[in-house]
């Protein structure tokens, strides 16, 4: 494995200069030198990065929390460690290792949240492409303790989207209080998170009701193993459709991966008694509206699920590297980021868009 790398002084990056979605490509952005890296930091030569709907929220500024703008977005990156900061103690990764950069770039590892394995809610969390520069760049600074090793033989363009979409839905399904044979509903099933959720659910032996819209997403969801398809734009009654597919009782769980509040509205109604709603999609301002009476009367659990910790990332990566979950993606150039955001706003992206950063 090579341990010496020639690192250029400048690089190409996609940068958000102001809130509202303006993206500028710069070809002369400085690359941090090895001497400039702090202890615990590493420089990753990016090979591929996925584009998550969260990047669009960050660029638009439509969340109650705002990104540190100007900022390089992106948090589904895969690449090679080409430098590590001096005085980094006990690094779990070495020069030449291929690693992934996820949304949770770093956490303190010592607070109560980190000790409980909920590293993502650490008060000192560094978030790639949100409060620290992310992966829409040829070189990204990340953190040795939190980068995720990518197994040999698992290509970077396939691995990239496991770092956010994959780990997020893997964890949400893990805590969805379901057993093999149970029914799980996935609103948003044809999108980046959703199409992976179908597959992670099938790995756990669940039966999947995919909800999204359009012929392309229908074909994708069916191909990936969805047992039932519901088009949310065509269905006259989603609750009735889910109940009809589940012996009239409703589903055991719903993992909502839609970016809009509409994906949430019927969920408590189509869950069966004891069912669990996993809130994953992140519309910025919407309130979760559910009947208090039926939430109590049906013993429904409503849980928020936010990305995943280092172990979740390794588990999600391992399943995908073994070929049990496959990212459905189209490769594009980073210059096309603006158009990709437009497509995403209109719900036109089936699966993921991945940018090839090796060219
Ligand atoms: P995406 O745009 O790729 O997919 C969203 C899908 O939802 C689209 O296919 C769209 O057609 C579908 N959809 C919209 N309205 C719907 C409805 N009413 N019913 C069913 N489907 C509907 O987006 P993505 O990258 O998969 O991200 C989805 C959301 O998840 C975003 O809000 C993102 O910020 C959020 N997210 C959350 C976490 C977390 O940790 N909880 C992590 C990553 C992303
Ligand atoms: Zn994401």
Image (cartoon, rainbow, N blue to C red):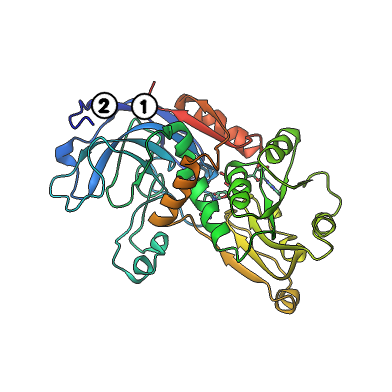
Element assignment for label 1: strand
Q: Is residue 42 rendered to the left or right of residue 212? A: left
Q: Position of residue 209 (x, y in %)?
A: 73, 51
Q: Nearer the viewer, residue 238 or 203?
A: 203
Q: Looking at the image, which residue is at 17% across and 37% down?
A: 34
* Res. 259 visible in picture: no
Mark 1, Cα crowd under 10 Å, few <14 / some 14-19 / many 20+, is some
Q: Looking at the image, which residue is at 72% across and 40% down?
A: 222
Q: Nearer the viewer, residue 82 or 282?
A: 82
Task: Please report whichever mark, 2 or 1, sits nearer to the chain's N-terminal start.
Answer: 2
Q: Position of residue 68 (x, y in %)?
A: 38, 48
Q: Quadrant of the N terminus?
A: top left
* Residue 149, picture quadrant: top left
- As drawn, the label of residue 26 is 1
- As drawn, the label of residue 331 is none
Q: Nearer the viewer, residue 284 or 2?
A: 2
Q: Looking at the image, which residue is at 16% across and 53% down?
A: 89
Q: Is residue 161 rendered to the left or right of residue 177? A: left
Q: Quadrant of the C terminus?
A: top left
Q: Is residue 336 above or below residue 115?
A: above
Q: Looking at the image, which residue is at 45% across and 38% down?
A: 160
Q: Specify the farthest residue to the top.
A: 359
- The residue tagged 2 is 10
Q: Is residue 245 rendered to the left or right of residue 85? A: right
Mark 2, Cα crowd under 10 Å, few <14 / some 14-19 / many 20+, is some
Q: Position of residue 278 (x, y in %)?
A: 61, 61
């Amino acid at each position: 494995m090579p341990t010496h790398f020639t690192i250029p002084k400048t690089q190409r990056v996609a940068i958000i200069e102001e809130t509202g979605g303006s993206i500028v490509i710069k070809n002369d952005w400085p690359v941090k030198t090895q001497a400039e890296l702090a202890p615990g930091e590493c420089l990753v030569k990016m090979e591929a990065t996925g584009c998550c709907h969260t990047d669009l929220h960050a660029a638009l500024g439509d969340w109650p929390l705002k990104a540190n703008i100007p900022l390089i977005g992106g948090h589904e990156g895969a690449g090679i460690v080409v430098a590590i900061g001096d005085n980094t103690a006990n690094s779990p990764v070495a020069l030449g290792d291929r690693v992934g950069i996820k949304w949770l770039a770093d956490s303190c590892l010592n607070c109560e949240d980190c000790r409980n394995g909920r590293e993502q809610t650490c008060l000192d969390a560094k978030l790639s492409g949100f409060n620290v520069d992310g992966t829409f760049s040829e070189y990204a600074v990340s953190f040795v303790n939190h980068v995720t090793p990518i197994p040999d033989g698992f290509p970077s363009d396939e691995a990239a989207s496991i770092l956010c979409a994959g780990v997020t839905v893997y964890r949400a399904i893990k805590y969805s209080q379901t057993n093999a044979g149970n029914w799980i509903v996935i609103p948003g099933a044809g999108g980046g998170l959703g199409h992976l959720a179908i597959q992670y659910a099938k790995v756990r032996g669940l039966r999947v009701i995919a909800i999204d819209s359009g012929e392309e997403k229908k074909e994708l969801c069916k191909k990936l193993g969805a047992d039932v398809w519901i088009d949310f734009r065509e269905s006259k009654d989603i609750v009735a459709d889910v109940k009809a597919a589940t012996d009239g009782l409703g589903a055991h769980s719903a993992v909502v991966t839609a970016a809009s509040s509409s994906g949430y509205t019927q969920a408590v109604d189509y869950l069966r008694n004891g069912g669990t709603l996993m809130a994953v999609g992140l519309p910025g301002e919407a309130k979760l509206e559910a009947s208090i009476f039926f939430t109590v009367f049906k013993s429904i659990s409503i849980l928020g699920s936010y990305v995943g910790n280092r172990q979740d990332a390794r588990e999600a990566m391992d399943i995908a590297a073994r070929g049990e979950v496959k990212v459905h993606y189209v490769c594009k150039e980073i210059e096309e980021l603006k158009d990709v955001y437009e497509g995403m706003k209109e719900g036109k992206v089936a699966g993921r868009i991945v940018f090839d950063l090796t060219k």
